[in-house]
Image (cartoon, rainbow, N blue to C red):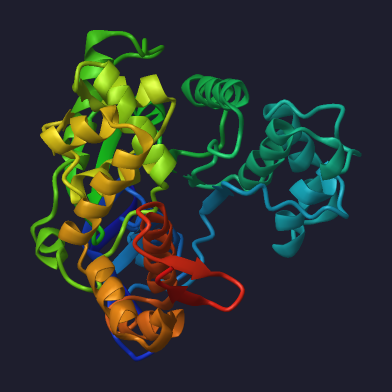
Amino acid sequence: MRILEAANLKKAFKGPKGQAHPVLNGVSLVLREGEIVALLGRSGSGKSTLLRILAGLIPPDEGEVRYRGHPVRGPVPGVGMVFQSFALFPWLTVFENVELGLEARGVPKAERRRRVQEAIALIGLEGFETAYPKELSGGMRQRVGFARALVTQPDALFLDEAFSALDVLTAETLRNDLLDLWLEGAMPTKAILLVTHNIEEAVYLADRLLVLGSPGRILTEHPVALPHPRDPESEGFRSLVEAVYEVLTQRPEEEAKAERTLAQKLPSASVSAMLGLLETLDRMGGRADLPELAEELALEVDDLFPLLDALELLDFVRLAAGDVELTEHGRALARAEAGRKREIFAEHLLRHIPLAEHIRRSLDLAPGHRLGEERFLEALTLHLTPEEARQVLDTLIEWGRYAELFAYDDQAGVLYRP
């Protein structure tokens, strides 16, 4: 039985000058009764946007979503959502936060009280009905979020990074509790759609994995035939994790073409984290598979891949088939003394990032060797959104300052050559 169907969904957001920035590009999928489906992908691949379109919270530019065979024209009443941020009303008690959705739907008071008590008991919040959010731990607050979503008895439960704001042990406990309720058939919902950047979490919970690439399109689909409870150390589990990492290391053709231009996107990666990764990789023999490296550094996809992308751009590592390997330059950088590290980094920054060379040349020619950042932001926003332009310039400022190519006065917003 199909709960939700999406056909050829496309979505783009407009920049300040009217330019389109694609977020989804022809996504089609089906969510059926009795399954948990996980949406995976790097940051910026459109996972959360897709989730909101499927829930009817924002419309697609093209394509169609159908719920139980009917076109979606607004918020889908059969969908409950749990977000990364707990999004609780601090002036309401646990009971009142859970009750709010039913009250908005006009459910009679007696029926509301019965359903709220059932949801609170189901999710393990009994005894906390009169507590306020500030009195609860992060895990308990997220349980309120689950109770609030489940009290409406939704057909489908959407989880948007629902465990990522919690510490590791709390997330694991809540994940296992949710899975137990699902396997026991105790939940009113008939399907779960999960957005996550945690690959192990997706393999642990889901029946199907959909891996999105950028701009948002489904690259691969992996059925998960492992029985519950799943052992994260088993061969089948690890092979699925590695298969997803392998897909995520593939570089889209259009993304590769967009590189080496003045307005190329730069990953948000700090120099210290990049250097730390290189040194760790050098200690591991210069080569590692990505699940092993992620475990060694205690990093998840959204934290690890920006570092790897930045290092690959600068020719310090090579990514292929789910593995990462130091280049000759990367090994030299990992082993160099502090002063030589800066020199190597500067050489590669100028060689591989056109904007770095452009800024240095512009400062060389400018009166007093000083220029306001607006000049560069304006050039970037011809091709990027204002947020992307700001992030690219901020990243390059950090890299350029470390390399001693230029300095930055953050009070005046001015770049200059010392």
Measured as percent of width and height from the top left, residue 319 is found at 15, 37
Which residue is depicted at the point 33% across and 23% down? 280
Measured as percent of width and height from the top left, residue 105 is found at 69, 62
Taking depth in this image into account, of 115 and 157 the one nearest to the observer is: 157
Which residue is depicted at the point 35% across and 41% down? 339
Question: Is 250 drawn above or below residue 358 in the view shown?
Answer: above
Measured as percent of width and height from the top left, residue 246 is found at 17, 33
Question: Is 195 drawn above or below residue 63 in the view shown?
Answer: above
* Residue placed furthest toward the right: 130
Measured as percent of width and height from the top left, residue 315 is found at 16, 45
Which quadrant of the figure contains the C terminus? bottom left
Query: Can you tell which quarter of the image residue 273 is in?
Result: top left
Tell me how many marks there are: 0
Which residue is depicted at the point 49% across and 77% down? 414
Query: Can you tell which quarter of the image residue 326 is in?
Result: top left
Taking depth in this image into account, of 310 and 25 the one nearest to the observer is: 310
Residue 5 visible in the current orientation: yes
Which quadrant of the figure contains the N terminus? top left
Residue 37 visible in the current orientation: no
